[in-house]
Image: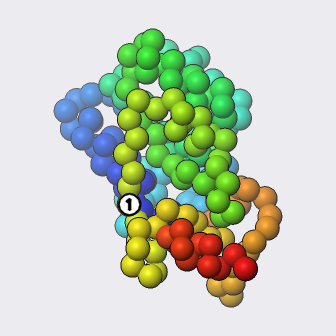
Amino acid sequence: MNAGKSTAMLQVAHNYEEQGQAVRLFTAAIDHRYGVGKVTSRLGPQRETEVFDKDTNFLQTIDKKIACLLVDEAQFLSKDQVKQLHQLAQVRGVPVITYGLRSDFLGEPFPGSAYLLALADDIEEIKNICSCGKKATMNIRVDENGKRIKEGEQISIGGNESYRQACGRCFYSEIH
């Protein structure tokens, strides 16, 4: 949350394309904060992308050689989709780079994230800072008054108005 994942993805796409190489970018269809099929950095850069939903089969969708496949909001991938991406990388030799959150506002892993962590060859953490100054590793959902929400559906799309990042200490100190 607010660590620059989308910015990093847009930069990677730019770097490949600047070298004349083809990339494909995907984001979750359910993330419509800035419009469906758009990866948007909170710093401003935005780009149209393809979308994935629960029915997307990446093995069927990626049918020709590309230099890289980039996926934003990867926490919304299904177990099978993560396995498809892993197969694209391992069998077809397509580099796959995903960007997403590890856990939800209750500290529970997203299914897509859990399988990505299990199958990834490399994991690079993009760091962010808690309001106390420590490294943020958790997310807290808040209401319109900034009060912490402690229950609800795992998936609720929102930005800075709905979530804030926290270190483990602040995350747990605010639970009670």
Q: Which residue lies at the image location 78% right of the left edge and 59% below the top edge? A: 153
Residue ID for mark 1? 127
Q: How many numbered circles does the render carry? A: 1
Q: Which residue lies at the image location 65% right of the left edge and 84% below the top edge? A: 146
Asked whether 69 or 104 is in front, the reply is 104
The quarter of the picture where residue 148 lies is bottom right
Q: Which residue lies at the image location 55% right of the left edge and 60% below the top edge? A: 34
Residue projecting furthest to the bottom: 145
**Residue 152 picture location, percent across and down:** 80, 64
Q: Is residue 91 found left or right of 168 in the rendered image?
A: left
**Residue 112 picture location, percent across and down:** 62, 39
Label 1's element? loop
75 vs 163: above or below: above
**Residue 142 picture location, percent across and down:** 67, 76
The quarter of the picture where residue 14 lies is top left
* Amino acid at circle 1: Lys
